[in-house]
Amino acid sequence: MLACDSMLKKLSILSKDEIELMKKSCRLAARTLEHVKPYVKAGITTNEIDQIIHDYILSHGATPSPLGYHGYPKSSCTSVNSVVCHGVPDETLLREGDIINVDVTTFYQGFHGDTSATFMVGAVSDKARDITQVAFDCMMKGIEAIVPFGTTGDIGFAIDKYATRKGYTTVKDIGGHGIGRIFHDEPFIPSYGKKGKGPSLVPWRCFTVEPMVNETSASLEEYDIPHSSIKWYKTEDNTLSAQFEHTVLVTDTGYEILTVPS
Ligand code: MF3
Ligand code: CO
Ligand code: CO
């Protein structure tokens, strides 16, 4: 592909029809997450969670974006406790007290919809409950900072300010992304930053807000996934990490969260 083609693709805004398709894909992603939630209980394996997600997406005429993406072997990511992101479903059994981020991305009629939530398995520690709540609140603070022609730095600033105030740290090297016909597009949406800095938030384009919130400032350990260029990450000191993700549309007056079930 010519450089100018990819530039045009990245800079183009969505038409009314494209927005409708994007909304459908995002709604399916949200419904998938809602569908799998009651299964996220002690005794299930992350492979079984992945299979439920895979089957639900296929039965609704879509495909799971992660499957085969840069060699990624599964249909979802399941990140338990100290796993920060891109946890690969396997034979791991969930246990009471775990927290698990389940990340679902659908590809429907040419558009990707990306959403994740951290679920608590049975009764969890106060610490686990608190970091899960703070991760959700950080995502919402980031989303609420979106204004048309604002900047990615406005979002990151709001996220990091809240996390820091609550005694947590945000992951700096991994974050949200433009999304639409391309799974991971520009701009990068950081979970830290300065107000007014970074790329402009252009109306009628979509991106994700997906802060990863960590219990300590320990660095991340990076692990290879066999036959894939995707890496998975965990906290070096094995402390907790939690995350939520929505896909949002920037409008001419603000934003719309697209990864909602109805
Ligand atoms: N859904 C993840 C995100 O929020 C990306 C997963 S890529 C995969 O961006 F290959 F690991 F599935
Ligand atoms: Co994403
Ligand atoms: Co995701």
Image (spheres, rainbow, N blue to C red):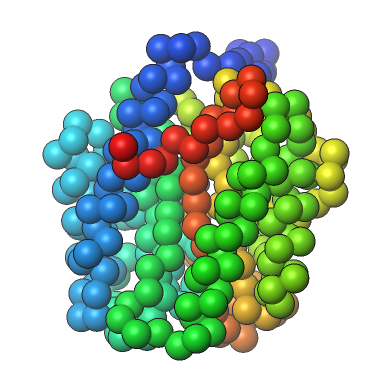
Q: Residue at x 41, y 26 (%)?
A: 22
Counting labels gives: 0
Residue 69 x, y percent position in the rendering = 41, 44
Task: Look at the picture and state if 116 lies above or below 164.
Answer: above
Q: Residue furthest front?
A: 253
Q: State the residue in front, 228 or 200.
A: 200
Q: Write the residue at 19% across / 56% down.
A: 52
Nearer to me, 23 or 254: 254
In this rendering, the answer to whether 200 lies above or below 38 is above
- Please state, as top left, top right, bottom left or bottom right, where the C terminus lies in the image: top left
Q: On the picture, is 96 further left or further right than 222?
A: left
The residue positioned 63% from the left and 29% from the top of the image is 254
Image: 8 above or below 186? above
Q: In the rendering, at what x and y percent does residue 85 appear?
A: 50, 63
**Picture coordinates of residue 171, whole percent (x, y):** 67, 63
- Which residue occupies 44% across, 35% down? 258
Q: Quadrant of residue 50?
A: bottom left
User: Percent x, y for residue 244?
Assistant: 50, 57
Q: Is residue 258 above or below residue 76?
A: above
Question: Quick check: can you spot residue 66?
Answer: no
Picture quarter containing residue 79?
bottom left
